[in-house]
Image: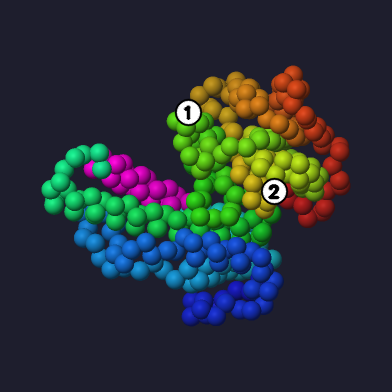
């Protein structure tokens, strides 16, 4: 992958890089173009600030900057004693986009709530009309900033996945994108809350649920990807549900979902239930009425889930550790 030596090179994204990753570049370019939109000639980032003329960053420059920042960290550390730290540093870089986008989303939600309150209040005064216009501009500006941050986060997370072979998974909240073709990763808490409130598809995706769970020590990526590819060929609108582990089977399945643009939901056990939390989580997964499931050998938690799925009549793929192909010497899964 071509890297830039300075920000002066950003405007001249090299042709070899475009040829090598043409499909990804087309997706990312369309995503950036769709996110970095000028909703208005004016911008407003707080309720107290006056509207001002301010442009969005150039989408091509933003895309190249992400590629440069993420790729250079891996290149500088590759083959050195510090190589293992590159993954942690880049994870933090991607997560900073994620957390900043969440902050912008919170401010956008507050502005939208106020706009709704103003719209319900019957007032024909000029003061009320100006406040409505200002709040609408604030909401629109924050929406544009949030979408741009999400586009950069999704691009950075894709480079992270390609470089490490592991999916980027945020520690807090869902990784939802409104304009991106990148698959959404949704936290179980957001998913269940959205279902209860009958919210939109962003946090409560509809579709046949496929459950995956397994131990944290697992190296055979191809086995799981082959099974998941077969399921997706039969159930194109599937939604992936994992048991939320950041290593092993769950991480492999989440990486597959990102590569195949499949929405995924991470059902992490609720610590409020103490030692019973994983088994309570298993019960909730079965209640979702999955149409198919993959359970790989792990612990008693996986055995419990497999038993519950069988009892519910869910078609089940069970794989044991011994079923795996031999692990490559360089495997880090």
Asked whether 108 falls inside the magenta stretch, the response is yes
Q: Quadrant of residue 28?
A: bottom right
Task: Say which residue appears at 64% left-offset and 73% top-offset.
Answer: 18
User: CA–CA distance between discs 1 and 2?
Assistant: 28 Å
| Boundaries of the magenta span | 98-118
Question: As rendered, which of 242 and 95 lies closer to the eye?
Answer: 242
Where disc 2 sits, the SS reads helix
Residue 300 in sight from this viewpoint = no
Where's residue 10, x and y in %? 51, 76
Where's residue 165, x and y in %? 69, 54
Q: Is residue 39 left or right of residue 301?
A: left
> Nearer the observer, disc 1 or disc 2?
1
Q: Are marks 1 and 2 in contact (CB under 8 Å)?
A: no
Residue 184 in sight from this viewpoint = yes
Task: Say which residue appears at 45% left-offset and 30% top-offset.
Answer: 197
Q: Which mark is residue 196?
A: 1
Asked whether 160 falls inside the magenta stretch, the response is no
Judged by its main secondary structure, the magenta piece is helix
Q: Which mark is residue 256?
A: 2
């Amino acid at each position: 992958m071509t890297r830039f030596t300075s920000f002066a090179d950003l405007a001249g994204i090299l042709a070899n890089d475009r040829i090598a990753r043409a499909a990804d570049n087309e997706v990312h370019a369309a995503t950036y173009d769709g996110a970095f939109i000028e909703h208005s000639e004016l911008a407003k980032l707080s309720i107290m600030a006056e509207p001002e003329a301010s442009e969005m960053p150039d989408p091509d420059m933003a895309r190249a900057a992400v590629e440069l920042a993420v790729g250079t960290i891996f290149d500088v550390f590759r083959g050195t004693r510090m190589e293992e730290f590159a993954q942690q540093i880049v994870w933090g870089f991607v997560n900073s986009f994620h957390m900043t986008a969440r902050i912008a989303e919170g401010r956008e939600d507050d502005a939208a709530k106020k706009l709704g309150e103003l719209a319900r209040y019957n007032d024909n005064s000029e003061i009320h009309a100006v406040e409505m216009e200002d709040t609408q501009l604030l909401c629109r500006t924050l929406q544009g900033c949030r979408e741009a941050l999400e586009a950069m986060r999704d691009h950075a997370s894709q480079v992270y996945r390609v470089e490490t072979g592991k999916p980027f998974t945020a520690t807090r909240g869902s990784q939802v994108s409104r304009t991106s073709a990148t698959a959404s990763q949704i936290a179980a808490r957001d998913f269940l809350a959205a279902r209860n409130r009958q919210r939109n598809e962003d946090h409560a995706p509809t579709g046949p649920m496929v459950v995956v769970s397994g131990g944290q020590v697992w190296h055979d990526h191809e086995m799981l990807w082959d099974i998941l590819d077969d399921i997706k060929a039969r159930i194109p609108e599937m939604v992936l549900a994992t048991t939320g582990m950041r290593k092993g089977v769950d991480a492999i399945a989440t990486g597959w979902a990102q590569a195949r643009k499949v929405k995924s939901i991470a059902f992490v056990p609720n610590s409020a239930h103490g030692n019973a939390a994983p088994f309570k989580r298993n019960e909730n997964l079965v209640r979702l009425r999955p149409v198919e499931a993959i359970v790989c050998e792990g612990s008693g938690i996986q055995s419990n889930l497999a038993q519950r799925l069988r009892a519910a009549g869910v078609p089940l793929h069970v794989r044991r550790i011994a079923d795996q192909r031999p692990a490559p010497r360089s495997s880090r899964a």
